[in-house]
Amino acid sequence: MKIGIEGQRLYRRNKHGMDMVALELIKNLQQTDHENEYVVFVKPDEDNTCIPQAPNFKIIELKGGPYPIWEQIALPKAAKAEGCDILHCTSNTGPIWSAVPLIVILHDIIYLESVSILKKGGTWYQKLGNMYRRWVVPPVVRKSKRVVTVSNFEKERIKNFMGLGDNLVAIYNGVGKHFIEITDKTILAQAKSKYHLPYRFLFFLGNTDPKKNTPNVLKAFAGFNAESDVKYKLVMLDFDETVLQAILSDIGHPEIRNDIHLTGYVVNTDLPAIINQCEVFLYPSLRESFGIPILEGMACGVPVITSNTSSMPEIAGNAALIVDPYNSGEIKNAIVRLVTDQELRAELKIRGMQQAAKFSWENMAKQYLSLYNEVYNEIKQQKK
């Protein structure tokens, strides 16, 4: 069997959620499957050594112009030319016309839902991407052999929204093995120096996407620091200064800018050393299909605050403080509890590490391999 894997953005330097999932899938398939052939289709970019070499894996740097042209024309043409039996598209979309049978990952369908968090905010790039997906996803899903999503919550959302049946399955994401409790003081000191980390800080992994709930997190932090005798900084990654200033102005708390530390982009391998040094990991998003960072924080032995919405309770289990993400006061109170209650911190640390251990990229890859075989056998039966 020859499996094509779409990995258009894997060579870009600044990788994010879906890119990391695809990369972990490939790396773990290389460890799991030494029999089938794989062809990974990527777009040329800076980080062209991120995919390890393996005898049964071929990497094709596929040019093709902008994202829609690359995906709709160059990708299906190349997959057919390579003789792929299956084409696995990993990033919420796929080619509408493909001679090669498709498996598509729908990480979420937020861009299809008419919810308030999508009506304002976000960059133009994000909005154009959502418009493209609104046009592409429905026909792609109808033509796919399997549609995979990442949680039971999202599976039900997709099932109800798009009317899918047995061809819709849920396969959990994992958490990287490098997300661990770090006791090596040299590693911690290097991260502190490299990213100029403050002495005492909370950690918020947000971005400009409205679903990340940045305004309410900043309101909660402002309220917490105003009331606390011990002052903290808030560390945020890869966040635009202009956007931050605008949010602080909108929520009426420009005075906390000096208490916020922006690190710029952080490579994934450096994240554990940053997380290990924070007092609390904040992830009270409005909407998530999975929420990998929840597990990353837990795996590092740090207490996590997350939301009572969408998939987050499913992934966090009983190992985090669960809050209403729309209520900044509730987020603030959760922060207060975690910085003052040492017994609760210790309990959540144990629970969190146990919860994170339930999710692995290796297990995810094995489930995808089983799915490839299932679809391939169906295709062979249909050809008889």
Image: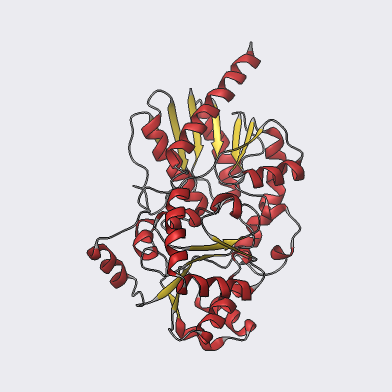
Model colouring: secondary structure
Residue at the far bottom in the pictured view: 255
Q: Residue at x 62, y 74 (%)?
A: 328
Q: Mark yes or no: residue 377 visible.
A: yes
From the top left corner, tell me how far across and down residue 39 is, in percent: 45, 33
Residue at the far front in the pictured view: 343
Establish if 28 lies above or below 318.
above
Q: How many marks?
A: 0
From the viewer's side, name the closer residue of 81 and 197. Answer: 197
From the top left corner, tell me how far across and down residue 146 is, in percent: 63, 32
From the viewer's side, name the closer residue of 44 and 19. Answer: 19
Q: Residue at x 43, y 46 (%)?
A: 357
Residue at the far top in the pictured view: 384
From the viewer's side, name the closer residue of 208 and 368. Answer: 368
Q: Residue at x 52, y 59 (%)?
A: 320
From the viewer's side, name the closer residue of 70 and 103. Answer: 103
Q: Residue at x 60, y 45 (%)?
A: 151
From the top left corner, tell me how far across and down residue 271 is, in percent: 38, 60
Q: Quadrant of the C terminus?
A: top right
Instruction: Tell me where residue 33 sits by quadrant.
Output: top left
Establish if 192 lies above or below 315.
below
Instruction: Tell me where residue 193 sits by quadrant.
Output: bottom left
Q: Is residue 298 left or right of residue 54?
A: right
Establish if 109 lies above or below 58.
below
From the top left corner, tell me how far across and down residue 125 is, in percent: 60, 62
Q: Mark yes or no: residue 235 visible.
A: no
